[in-house]
Amino acid sequence: MKKLLGLLALTLAVSGVASADQDFLKSINFDTNVRYRYMDLDTTEGDSPFIGNEGFSKENRVRTRWYKTVSGTVVLSDEFGLEADFAVVHRNQTNRIGNFKRSKEELWNPSLTIKKGIQLGNLETIFKLKYENETTRPRENGATGEYRTGGIFNEITFGPEFRTNILGQNIKVDTGVVYFKMSGVADNNLPTTIGNMTDKGKADGWGLNFNLSKDGTIVDAGFGKITYGLDFINKFRDIKGEFGGEKVGSNVYLDYLQNVTYTTPTLLGGFYGQLILQNEWEKHTSVTGWNNTFDIVTGLGYKTSFDTSVGEITINPYTSYSILNRESNYNKDRDNKRITIERNEIRAGLKLGLAVK
């Protein structure tokens, strides 16, 4: 917390000397949150062994994650409308079975996107050049020892994004040509780690992204607000490399996500509650089977903002609890074609933001 406040104070000082005729900071945000995941480890019978909810007991904790994220936007040129979005995500993770810590690892995930938008009537076109890195660092002896680099993933994407609003509904189409290079690290665009897919344990390749999103408000009344979101993510990747003397080949990652969110009216100057229903279906075309995850999440938070000489500061502590997280994996080649598990997760975090004047 002290570090976040210190960074925010530094940002205020830096932005105070920014000039409107020069490159300047447009916004900056900090987010830190802790996530505890639980499973009913006592239920081990049948085809779907981990079904149930025994609550937040230490014996059923399976994973702890701590996220720290810094993100923002910098205006590179007012004259040409050129901006850059940046983000740095750091995650500490402990995998455990109850009180026994099986392994620890950390992840670094920085990204930088240079973009320029063009408005033509109701259609906004944003040309983007994005670089993203993902580096995993597990401890060398499971839960002890020094952190060692486990894998590195680099990806460069270039392409346009199209946004429009039709009858109050937001529609976005995000496209791009991709080049990637990776070694020994798992990425959600691929069905498994490169180390398991190629003889050399590393590979590179190219790809295409075609992602369609739609969201909007269903109702906004005195009792609160109900919104929805639809995401259809399609990522093609062609991988250079061989496994067992044969070419690894290509894969299309399909990720279809639907959600409905109810948000209460603001109470007592900033408190709010949320209820989220969400379903996600995922598939890799290069392997048999698919995954489907259904979530019911409740949330509670407090959000307030105030003006300063350099901009508006927003403070948002929040917490959430997944009442139900049910994941089903289907594979027609298994004797037990469908395996289902249930998990519960509680999160607590704090967001700080600055929108520069």
Image (spheres, rainbow, N blue to C red):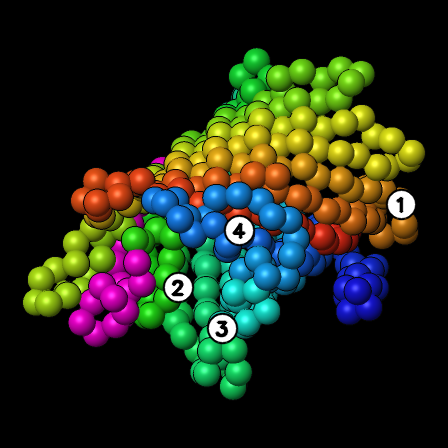
Ranked by sequence position, the earlier of labels 3 and 4 is 4
- The residue under label 2 is 154
Q: How much space separates mark 4 and mark 2, taking CA atoms?
A: 37 Å
- The Cα–Cα distance between marks 3 and 4, rounded to whole angstroms, is 20 Å
Q: Would you say the residues marked 3 and 4 are in contact, meaning their CB atoms lie under 8 Å apart?
A: no
38 horizontally vs 43: left or right: right
Q: Residue at x 39, y 71 (%)?
A: 151
Q: In the rendered image, which residue does mark 1 sit on? A: 307
Residue 3: which numbered mark, if any?
Answer: none
- Dot 1 falls on a residue whose secondary structure is strand
Q: Amino acid at mark 4?
A: Asp
Of labels 2 and 1, earlier in sequence is: 2
Q: Residue at x 70, y 39 (%)?
A: 299
Give the amino acid type for the residue marked by disc 3 in the picture.
Ser
Of the two numbered discs 3 and 2 on the same chain, state the one appearing first in sequence: 3
Q: Position of residue 200 (x, y in %)?
A: 21, 74
Question: In the rendered image of this protein, does residue 33 appear above or below residue 290?
Answer: below
Identify the magenta region. Answer: 192-210
Q: Earlier in the sequence, mark 3 or mark 1?
A: 3
Q: In this rendering, which labeled residue sits more in front, label 3 or label 2?
A: 3
The residue that mark 3 highlights is 103
